[in-house]
Image (cartoon, rainbow, N blue to C red):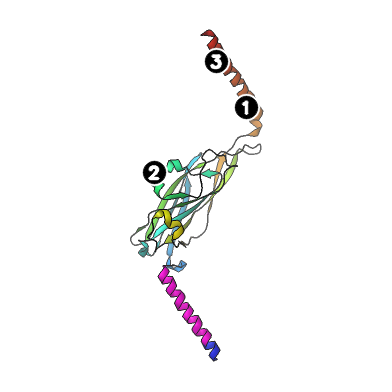
Amino acid sequence: MSFRNMNQVKTLYISAIIFGSIQLACGIRVAEDFSKVLSNCQVTGDGFHREVQVSSSFLPSSLQDCKVLIKWTIPSGIYIDPYQLQASILNQTVHFSSHVNVEQMAHHAETLILHSFPNLHCSSSCHFSQTMQFHLRYHLPSNTSDYTEVSLSSPVTYVSCDCTLPIDVAMNKCLWEELPQLEVLNYNVFVPIGDLSHLPFVTLLTIAVAFIGTGCVAWASVIQ
């Protein structure tokens, strides 16, 4: 081996040692540090008001002092009510990327990013779970289908083991490592929508009811 090649090998070896030291100093964990990751995400309920629950368990158990961050991507056809959260314990651990208009229709709304911080419990392994209630927005009517489809993706989970900052600043100030997951699942939710073929009948009925109501009020005022 030439002198030049020996120097290159030494340089690579020293770089590896330095990088390994940086990893230890910063608390960076690679995918191999998490073994036997078991994640579950399911949607329950029916109608316009449902729940999504995410849970995960993994090794090592030495992560008991770490924080967990869940990143939810909420499509425009769904919303999570911040006013509803104010009455629950989640109010202190959920952060919205922007203002939520709960009365907006789906075609006017935008995709929302939501971050939550569930409690991490560790014994022989570490685990967490969190349930989030969500609501379906009203969609535009159609003359081809009675339902439309909204796709909700499973959230992404991150772990930080060197963060001592409060939750309200930890999201942007701490170093977060993504927790490995087997696959990203999409959950399709069917939303009932109006039928445009009923528009003439509904319009005539609405006008008739309005005239009858106005006539009843006028007649009652004349009698009095």
The image quadrant of residue 169 is: bottom left
Distance between the alpha carbons at the discs numbered 3 and 1: 22 Å
Q: Which residue has dot 3 on it?
A: 217
Which class describes the residues within 10 Å of circle 1: few (<14), some (14-19), or many (20+)? few
* Mark 2 crowd level (few <14, some 14–19, many ≥20, 10 Å Cα): few
2 or 3: tag closer to the N-terminus: 2
Kindly identify the amino acid type of the residue bearing the numbered disc 2. Ser
Mark 3 or mark 1: whose residue is earlier in sequence: 1
Residue 118 vertical position relative to residue 9 in the rendered view, above or below: above
The foreground one among 180 and 175 is 175
Residue marked by disc 2: 88
Residue span colored magenta: 7-27
Q: Residue at x 43, y 63 (%)?
A: 36
Residue depicted at 37% across the width and 63% down the height: 63
Q: Amino acid at mark 3?
A: Val
Cα gap from disc 2 to disc 3, whole angstroms: 44 Å
Please give the label number shown on residue 202: 1
Rendered image quadrant of residue 123: bottom left
Q: Secondary structure at mark 3?
A: helix
Residue 19 belongs to magenta span: yes
Q: Is residue 15 above or below residue 173?
A: below
* Callout 1 amino acid: Val
- Residue 178 horizontal/vertical position (percent): 47, 61
Place of residue 6 in the rendered image (x, y in percent of width and height, measured from the top left): 52, 88
Query: Secondary structure beneath disc 1?
Result: helix
